[in-house]
Each structure stands twice: as structure tokens, then as C-alpha cells.
Image (spheres, rainbow, N blue to C red):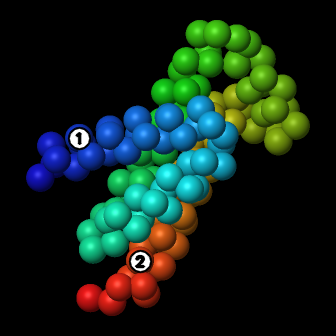
């Protein structure tokens, strides 16, 4: 069960990386579609949220190798009055919240459209 949940989260994370290549807001669309597809599963929104956080963590890691992410985080952290690590945590939390909310909405729409 845990292995299947981990695999599912990794697949969803890969889909969110692909969606993020289009635009950041495509994560919400992908999560809503995932919510529709997993309308009968209890953990669908949680998997979407964890997958989005994992995807954006991978994207942040990739960007860290390509440019001055630390400088940007320190500057933005100064504006927000948090440390640079706080900027990273807020970024991942934002991705997770977008995905969870969109998946819950998608699941609600699916359940309304086809009642069980």
C-alpha cells in the first residue's frame, strides 16, 4: 500500500513538472484533472499536494544549479522578513496548497456530475 502510494505520488509529481513547464498555473489544472480521475479515492487531494510539493522541490533544485537562486531567495526573504529557507518553504507550501485545493474542487465537480 505504501509502495503504491509512493509510486503514485512520483507519477503525479512528474506530471506536475510537465505542467509547470507550460506555466505555474497549469499545476492547478493538472491537479483538478487528477481530482476528477481519483474522485472515489480518499487520498487523492493529499497525493496531489505531495506531488506538487515534490515537483516544485525538484524544479527548485534544478534552478539552483542553473542560476542565482540563493541570491533571489535572500532578496525576497529580506522583503518578506523571513530567512531564505522560509522562502523555499513558502514556495513548496504554495504549490501544495494550489494542488490540494484544485484536486478537492475537481473531486467535488466529479462527484456532483456522477453521483455514487
Q: Residue at x 15, y 43 (%)?
A: 3
Marks 2 & 1, CB-CB < 8 Å contact: no
Which residue is labeled 1 in the image? 7
Which residue is labeled 2 in the image? 110
Q: Residue furthest top?
A: 66
Q: Is residue 111 left or right of residue 20?
A: left
Estimate the x, y position of residue 23 in percent, counting from the top left.
66, 40
In primary-sequence order, the first of circles 2 and 1 is 1
Q: Tell which of 19 and 72 is nearer to you.
A: 19
Q: Is residue 87 above or below residue 26?
A: above
Q: Residue at x 88, y 37 (%)?
A: 79
Q: Is residue 38 left or right of residue 56?
A: left
Residue 105 seen anywhere in this rendered image of the structure: yes
Q: Helix or strand or loop: what does disc 2 sit on?
A: helix
Q: Residue at x 66, y 49 (%)?
A: 25
Estimate the x, y position of residue 8 in percent, counting from the top left.
27, 46
Query: Of circles 2 and 1, which is in front?
Result: 2
Q: For mark 1, does the 10 Å Cα neighbourhood hold few (<14), some (14 to 19), or many (20 or more) residues?
A: few
Estimate the x, y position of residue 45 in percent, counting from the top left.
41, 63
Q: Is residue 109 left or right of residue 3?
A: right
Q: Tell which of 94 and 55 is nearer to you.
A: 55
Q: Helix or strand or loop: what does disc 1 sit on?
A: helix
Q: Is residue 4 above or below residue 78?
A: below
Estimate the x, y position of residue 97 in percent, counting from the top left.
56, 57
Q: Tell which of 5 and 34 is nearer to you.
A: 34
Q: Residue at x 48, y 56 (%)?
A: 31
Q: What quarter of the picture does the C terminus occupy?
A: bottom left
Q: For mark 2, does the 10 Å Cα neighbourhood hold few (<14), some (14 to 19), or many (20 or more) residues?
A: some
Amino acid at each position: 500500500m505504501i509502495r503504491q502510494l509512493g509510486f503514485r505520488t512520483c507519477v503525479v509529481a512528474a506530471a506536475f513538472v510537465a505542467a509547470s513547464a507550460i506555466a505555474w498555473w497549469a499545476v492547478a489544472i493538472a491537479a483538478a484533472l487528477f481530482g476528477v480521475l481519483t474522485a472515489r479515492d480518499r487520498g487523492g487531494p493529499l497525493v496531489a499536494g505531495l506531488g506538487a510539493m515534490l515537483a516544485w522541490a525538484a524544479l527548485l533544485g534544478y534552478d539552483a544549479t542553473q542560476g542565482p537562486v540563493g541570491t533571489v531567495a535572500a532578496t525576497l526573504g529580506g522583503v518578506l522578513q523571513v530567512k531564505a529557507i522560509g522562502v523555499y518553504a513558502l514556495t513548496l507550501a504554495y504549490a501544495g496548497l494550489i494542488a490540494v485545493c484544485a484536486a478537492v474542487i475537481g473531486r467535488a465537480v466529479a462527484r456532483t456530475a456522477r453521483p455514487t
